[in-house]
Image (tube, rainbow, N blue to C red):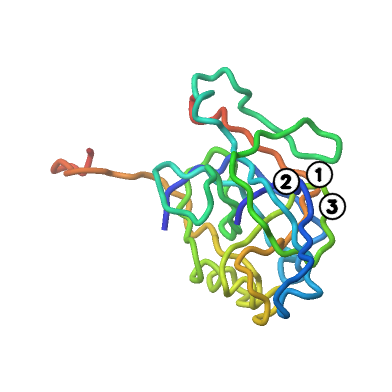
Amino acid sequence: MILGQVVGTVWATRKNPNLERLKLAIVRPHFWYNPPHDVDHLVAVDQVGAERGQDVLVCVGQPGRWMAGTSAAPIEASIMAIVDRVVMGPSTEDGTP
Amino acid sequence: MILGKVVGAVWGGKETNSLENSKLLQVQPVRLKAPAAADGSSPLEWTISANGPAVPLGSTMKVVMDTLGAGVGEYVLIAHGSRVRDLTVGPEYPTKEVVIAIVDSAWIDLGMDGG
């Protein structure tokens, strides 16, 4: 899974029928990750209602499709959670970084 | 999945049997922010639409199988992987990149993270 920020939305009417009613969000990963593409964005199915500007957790690969509710949808990335807070490195006693 | 722009079609005069009856497109992936323009000189907001302005594209090119009928100049959503292929064009086709949607419009705003 990767951390990223929702930066946009995609609308499409001509699409694979199994993509019906799925919301598509454009996500910019916060950190380096290893996609099979030389790009700086990815499009993920949004099931949690993330809004633009929010940080999200994106699951890439097959589990992302399982989580989309329909295993027949040809997708490989979906938003699993909206991130409230991330702590990196050793935390202090009261939990703040 | 990623966004890309169809820049051309590919035809094979002689091709492997499993590629017959398939349509191949040359697609250039969208690159939201070129590394050289990270100083804020590039726009942070784009709208992809039928007659909208050009969205920055990456320097790479990929050949993608299409069953939806995308045309040159259109933006498409590309999914990657053998499972995606099985669910769209079928397991008999030797490809890992498939067009799963033709983009009507998209809105991108990179200005929210403070540049």
Looking at the rendered structure, whether the residues under marks 3 and 1 are on a common chain is answered as yes
- Which numbered tag is attached to residue B5? 2
Quarter holding residue A85: top left
CA gap, disc 3 to disc 2?
Answer: 10 Å
Q: Residues within 10 Å of mark 1 (few under 14, many from 20)?
A: some
Question: What is the x, y in percent for residue B56?
Answer: 65, 33
Q: Are marks 3 and 1 in contact (CB under 8 Å)?
A: yes
Ranked by sequence position, the earlier of labels 3 and 2 is: 2
Q: Nearest the camera: A57 or B87?
A: B87
Residue corresponding to mark 1: B73
SS class, disc 3: loop
- Chain bearing mark 2: B
Vertical arrangement, residue B54 with respect to residue A22, above or below: above
Cβ atoms under marks 3 and 2 closer than 8 Å = no
Residue at 16% over, 44% down? A90
- Chain letter of the residue beneath label 3 in the structure image: B
Q: Which residue is mark 3?
A: B71
Alpha-carbon distance for marks 3 and 1? Answer: 6 Å
Q: Is residue B40 left or right of residue B49?
A: left
In three-dimensional space, the C-alpha distance between marks 1 and 2, rounded to whole angstroms, equals: 6 Å
Across the whole image, how many numbered discs are drawn on residues?
3
Question: Residue sitting at 82 percent across and 56 percent down?
Answer: B70
